[in-house]
Image: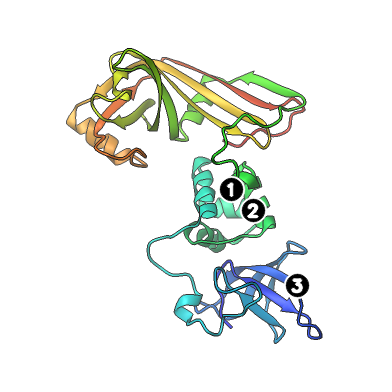
Amino acid sequence: MRAHLGDQLVIESPATGAARRDGEIVGLHHEDGTPPYDVRWSDTDEVTLVFPGPDAHVRHLDHGPPGTDTSEAQPASEAAPQAGAPNPGDVGRRVAVERRRRGLSRGEAARRARMSPDYLAYLEEHPADPTVATLIRLADALGTTVSALRGAGVDTPPGQGHALLHPHLRDLTPEECRALLSTHGVGRIAVTAPDGRPAIIPVNYEIVDDDIVFRTAPGSAAAAAVGTDAAFEVDHMDDASSQGWSVLAVGPASAVTETAAVRRLVQHAHTAPWAGGNREMWVAIRPVRLTGRRITPADGQAAMGH
């Protein structure tokens, strides 16, 4: 028997052959994927060390129909997680993004979610189908929701959910606004486009020395912000819980042209512009006014974690 992290261990009834207990393999003790395993049982959510008996089999991720034991047919090189370039699934990518957004190491995030750091690493780097209990713990540790980790509502505009029964809307301090801006990601810049019409453009941005910086192309709508007092907005909405926050930064925008400064910005860049193409013009906004608001339950329940 061989397994890898994320596989399911199924214990069958000797009399009927039906599954009587199952759990997620969250820890390996041998590199070749042989027993014993640390298993988180789906019925109790407890992790125990298991030496599988003859009534147990491994259900591999993405290998055959449910209940099929393909462990013996797999060579050890396929049973264990593979080294090399990560190939995460959608859930793993969302988990990694939320973890980095909160500034958590894998070890700290795993501790908060009560799981093995090795399993969290596997989840972030390989296609996987974690149990609902695992997703609940991860969502709680990362300050998000199970639906968000699963990608529910990705194509649905936020704000269509029900409002909170007793919402509390409060102003954010400049320090809170800076902390939320520093999470990086995608924001929107308001400009007067070259055709004279107002426009709001989404851009990937970074925070460098308190400046909001992004890359664009000369002559683009976003480049029209240079030489003006620009407004830049970033927000996060949790439609499932009807909570969220928004931050607005206002300040002069300028093109970064000094060679050393451009080189430094390239070195600090976390990602390339999603729009692709030749976008080598850096624009910096120096905020002179920061305002923001957050909606939370009025009963003092915890707000979103980012």
Q: CA distance from mark 2 to mark 1?
A: 8 Å
Label 3–label 2 contact, CB within 8 A: no
Q: Quadrant of the C terminus?
A: top right
The residue under the point 59% across, 83% down is 1
Q: Secondary structure at mark 3?
A: strand
Q: Mark 2 — residue?
A: 135
The residue under the point 24% across, 34% down is 280
Q: Mark 1 — residue?
A: 149
Residue 241 screen position, x and y as percent: 68, 35
Which label was assigned to residue 123? none
Q: Which residue is more in the foreground, 159 or 92? A: 159
Residue 87 screen position, x and y as percent: 43, 60
Q: Amino acid at mark 3?
A: Arg
**143 in relation to 41, above or below:** above
The residue under the point 28% across, 19% down is 254
**304 in relation to 75, above or below:** above
